[in-house]
Image (spheres, rainbow, N blue to C red):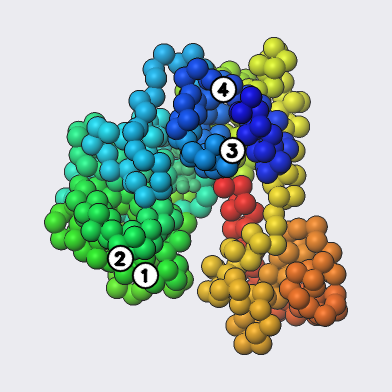
């Protein structure tokens, strides 16, 4: 069957463990699927969401390879009576989520609401600001800028604002900065910028996710600047998220940065233990999963702060319980948590490090890999080498090869320099630690 071939291809492209854990839980609805829409069932909303966000694009692409048609991928929860209304758009990435009746469900995740968001002191400020904005868009905090680390609920809050206002029939656009940029280049290339501008400048609420990717994208920044002015000038609401404060986004035009700071800037901090526990319980409740308190506490205390990762653990525990038809034991939970932590560090690649470090240190990835002797670049390159040695299993010779260096002595020289700097400069040490933390939390996105 076609779908088996597709899944075989997918299997070759993704980590085996992910395939076993998530993709194997899917079933395909052959009858309901058509060439332009592929429908899968997942055992619960968590798995459905996971597959859709992590593998939706990939699956769609693989179908296209085999059939020439790029289908929309739908992952529904098995036995859910409610059928996700299917959006009828041409499936090129140029169509955004302008939503008035038409495209509600596929763009905004209906389960990301204010009700399903657990409030604690770490996120209370962001939550309250988001709710205010949702209730009275364009009136007070405009723009609202939410920033914080990976998996802390920024995207969730954006969707919550969107869902709240869809119900009130407002014109809402949700888009990631990357999508915005892709659409922009697409329309530019095709000479259809009018359409792009009409779309973005006629909404009531613009929700822009992961704005940090604006870094050094000059053309996109220019376009966004005009979009911003038009919307803001007409009293339309803009909400943005980023992993950092606007001041810290490197390569951001000053005029945009200052506009981002016009309204309210709020951060989300990592959740305290009780909030983590409450979130886990909420997720279990929403997904009909039962886990003993003792185990909930264990997960909360031993996993990091990334809630997305914690959800991954819950999915695994639940999948295991279903498969073995038995309840989840503490011992098993401990194993799963341990493996997850180990796996995370095994999954970090030099490219991940280059990506994060170049963004944080304000140099281009290509410069890091180049032979440039400029001081700033040399230091960035040394830092990447140092981090690659400490965070990945790469040997010195293999690092030398990656950076096109003569041999491993160049790598060991770089290590020595960074170690010296760490020893004598507390600030430098803190910078390295922060980078290292950013890298380990970014790779699980
Ligand atoms: P971010 O955009 O900050 O990286 P997300 O909004 O994607 O993080 O959140 C990751 C996952 O964690 C989502 O499934 C989200 O529902 C969940 N989550 C994060 N914070 C909370 C919270 N306070 N209450 C409920 N769920 C949360
Ligand atoms: Mg996000």
User: Which quarter of the image is occupied by the N terminus?
Assistant: top right
From the image, state whether disc 1 or disc 3 is nearer to you.
3
Considering only vertical position in the picture, is 120 above or below 48?
A: below
From the image, state whether disc 2 or disc 3 is nearer to you.
3
Q: Which mark is residue 219?
A: 1
Q: Secondary structure at mark 4?
A: strand
Q: Residue at x 52, y 50 (%)?
A: 150
Q: Secondary structure at mark 3?
A: helix
Residue pointed to by mark 2: 223
* Other residues around mark 3 within 10 Å, as few (<14) / some (14–19) / many (≥20): few
| 242 or 351, nearer to the observer | 351
Q: CA distance from mark 4 to mark 2?
A: 41 Å
Q: CA distance from mark 2 to mark 3?
A: 36 Å
Query: Cβ–Cβ below 8 Å for labels 1 and 4?
Result: no
* Image location (x, y in percent) of residue 151: 52, 45
Left or right? Give the position of 26 relative to 332: left
Whether residue 282 is visible to the viewer of this picture, yes or no, is no
From the image, state whether disc 4 or disc 3 is nearer to you.
3
Q: CA distance from mark 2 to mark 1?
A: 6 Å
First in sequence: mark 4 vs mark 3: 4
Q: Secondary structure at mark 2?
A: helix
Query: Cβ–Cβ below 8 Å for labels 2 and 3?
Result: no
* Residue 122: quarter of image: top left
Whether residue 383 is visible to the viewer of this picture, yes or no, is yes
Q: Is mark 2 within 8 Å of ligand 2?
A: no
Furthest residue toward left? 234
* Image location (x, y in percent) of residue 155: 42, 44
* Residue 61: quarter of image: top right
């Amino acid at each position: 069957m076609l779908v088996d071939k597709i899944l075989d291809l997918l299997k070759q492209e993704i980590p085996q463990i992910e395939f076993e854990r998530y993709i194997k839980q899917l079933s395909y609805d052959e009858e309901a699927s058509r060439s332009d829409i592929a429908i899968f069932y997942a055992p619960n909303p968590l798995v459905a969401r996971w597959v859709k966000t992590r593998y939706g694009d990939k699956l769609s692409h693989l179908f296209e390879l085999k059939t020439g048609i790029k289908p929309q991928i739908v992952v529904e929860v098995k036995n859910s009576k409610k059928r996700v209304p299917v959006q009828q758009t041409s499936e090129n990435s140029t169509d955004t989520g302008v939503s008035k009746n038409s495209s509600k469900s596929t763009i905004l995740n209906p389960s990301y609401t204010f009700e399903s968001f657990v409030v604690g002191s770490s996120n209370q400020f962001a939550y309250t600001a988001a709710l205010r904005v949702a209730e009275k868009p364009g009136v007070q905090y405009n723009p609202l800028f939410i920033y914080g680390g990976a998996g802390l609920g920024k995207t969730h809050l954006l969707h919550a604002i969107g869902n709240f206002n869809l119900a009130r029939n407002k014109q809402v656009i949700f888009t990631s900065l990357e999508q915005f940029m892709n659409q922009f280049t697409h329309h530019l290339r095709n000479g259809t910028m009018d359409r792009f501008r009409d779309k973005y400048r006629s909404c009531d609420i613009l929700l822009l996710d992961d704005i940090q990717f604006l870094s050094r994208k000059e053309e996109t920044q220019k376009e966004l600047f005009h979009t911003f002015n038009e919307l803001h000038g007409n009293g339309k609401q803009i909400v943005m998220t980023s992993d950092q404060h606007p001041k810290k986004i490197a390569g951001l035009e000053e005029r945009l940065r200052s506009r981002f700071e016009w309204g309210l800037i709020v951060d989300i901090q990592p959740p305290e233990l009780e909030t983590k526990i409450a979130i886990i319980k909420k997720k279990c409740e929403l997904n009909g999963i039962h886990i003993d308190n003792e185990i909930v506490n264990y997960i909360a205390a031993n996993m990091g702060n990334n809630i997305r990762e914690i959800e991954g653990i819950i999915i695994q525990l639940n999948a295991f319980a279903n498969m073995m038809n038995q309840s989840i034991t503490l011992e098993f939970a401990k194993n799963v948590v341990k493996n997850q932590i180990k796996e995370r560090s095994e999954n970090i690649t030099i490219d991940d490090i280059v990506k994060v470090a170049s963004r944080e240190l304000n140099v281009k990835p290509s410069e890091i890999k180049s032979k440039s002797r400029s001081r700033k670049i040399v230091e960035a390159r040394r830092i990447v080498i140092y981090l690659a040695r400490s965070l990945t299993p790469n040997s010195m010779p293999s690092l030398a090869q990656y950076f096109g260096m003569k041999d491993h002595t160049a790598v060991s020289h770089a290590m020595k320099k960074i170690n010296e700097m760490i020893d004598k400069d507390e600030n430098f040490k803190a910078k390295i630690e922060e980078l290292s933390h950013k890298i380990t939390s970014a790779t699980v996105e």
